[in-house]
Image (spheres, rainbow, N blue to C red):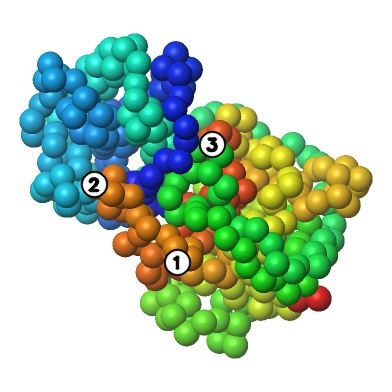
Amino acid sequence: MRPDTATRATRASTPSPALQDRYDDVRAATMALAAPLSGEDCALQSMPDASPVKWHLAHTTWFFETFLLVPSLLAYAPFDDAFRVLFNSYYNSVGDRYPRPQRGLLSRPDLATVCAYRTHVDAAMRALLARGLATDVAELVELGVHHEQQHQELILTDVKHLLSHNPTGPVYRAGWPLSAVRPQPLAWHRYEGGVVPIGHDGNGFAFDNEGPAHRVMLAPYALASRPVTHGEFADFIADGGYKRPELWLSLGLDAVRERGWRAPLYWSREDDGRWQTFTLHGFVEIDPHAPVCHVSYFEADAFARWAGARLPTEFEWEHAARNVEVDGNFVERGALHPLACAGDATAAAAAPGQLYGDVWEWTSSSYAPYPRYAPAAGAVGEYNGKFMCGQYVLRGGSCATPRSHVRATYRNFFPPDARWQFSGIRLARDV
């Protein structure tokens, strides 16, 4: 999932009052995520792949202004013509863009002006929604809402990366959400495979990369009952996992050597040899039973090989998740960190646990188009299909993902060396 994955919605017309409520709720949720931050926090950019919170607040607003208000309201006056360039992300069809790696240099406009920009656009959007919408316009509003939910997750992951560079260990949210639980032992769920349906069926919202629906052939396989834990990954490190070339893809081993990887992102050793990690709640000792996160595809693949298993394909994952309720540790819970699997034995025997929430789960599938895929027409279709190269698919959502944003067919995607997202590991094996 790029920060600006623009795609085609497949939703039928939505009544304006319901859509207005959803719009208002999502816009308010974004501001609530920014509330604990200072103006300085919101202005900084810690790496080219991240963006300042101020930019996220403005860009999501730019989306509604550019793709809905300017085309739909003849009397609408843009807040500031300069914003068309400053807060354009990847939409070449719209015009010039300010360079992504330099977004942290934009001290102007200040945070107060960006907040005023949001207020200005929200007022105009309410006027637009109040008059009733054609189906295609309602679909575009729904797309904008889901686009903003993508940026809500990015606000948290980008802020975490930013704060991690401060040696004082600043806290985004006080209070540690983890409590002692009885850990679940790893078990395996067998699936017979066969010819199975994959992709979104067209009922309700979906991004265009989730379709068209089609069928694939799966050999029998087994899926682990829960994600790999911090403790299990620590065992991999203790067994020389980062030092054993036979476990690594060539590009992965290059990354380990060139970047000095010795543990997942945010891990560090205390003086007594114990591992600690940086979280949105500050520095804490790792919970050995909680899902490991902030690992790259390369690390996930190497761990799977070390464990005598493999990563699932995205089709195996979706087949297993199709009849599992979308529930779990999402952003609404407020934990902002993966939680240990604490389900009862009966539930664990029925289906794999934590398929949704906690951590995005790497799959072995390259991000590629489904059969008969075609990107949406116009600028909003510009940034999905052309990212289908050099990336891998993740599934299931994380502790930073809004629950209403996730479905069994949802396809997240990142380059194989990406680590700043809440990305984790679920094992699979042939049977």
Circle 1 crowding by C-alpha within 10 Å: few under 14, some 14–19, many from 20? some
Instruction: Say whether disc 2 or disc 3 marks the residue closer to the N-terminus.
Output: 3
Q: Label 2: which residue?
A: 379
- Note whether 198 is above or below 112 in the view shown: below
Q: Quadrant of residue 125?
A: top left
Quadrant of the rendered image containing residue 154: top left
| Mark toward the start of the polypeptide (3 vs 1) | 3
- Residue 204 badge: 3
- Horizontal relation, residue 97 to residue 317: left or right: left
Residue 25 visible, this orientation: no
314 and 224: which is toward the camera: 314
How far apart are the alpha carbons under marks 3 and 1? Answer: 23 Å
Please give the name of the residue rendered at 50% of the width and 54% of the height, measured from the top-left corner: 211
The correct choice, above or below, for 93 with respect to 43 in the image is: below
State which tag comes first along the sequence, 1 or 2: 1
**Residue 270 % position (x, y):** 59, 56
Label of residue 368 in the image: 1
Q: Residue visible at 20% across and 33% down?
A: 66
| Residue type (three-letter) at the residue carrying disc 2 | Ala
Q: Secondary structure at mark 1?
A: loop
Is residue 400 shown left or right of residue 408? left
Dot 1 amino acid type: Ala
Indicate the position of residue 233 as horizontal and vertical percent values. Answer: 66, 64
* Helix, strand or loop status at disc 2: helix
Q: CA distance from mark 2 to mark 3?
A: 22 Å
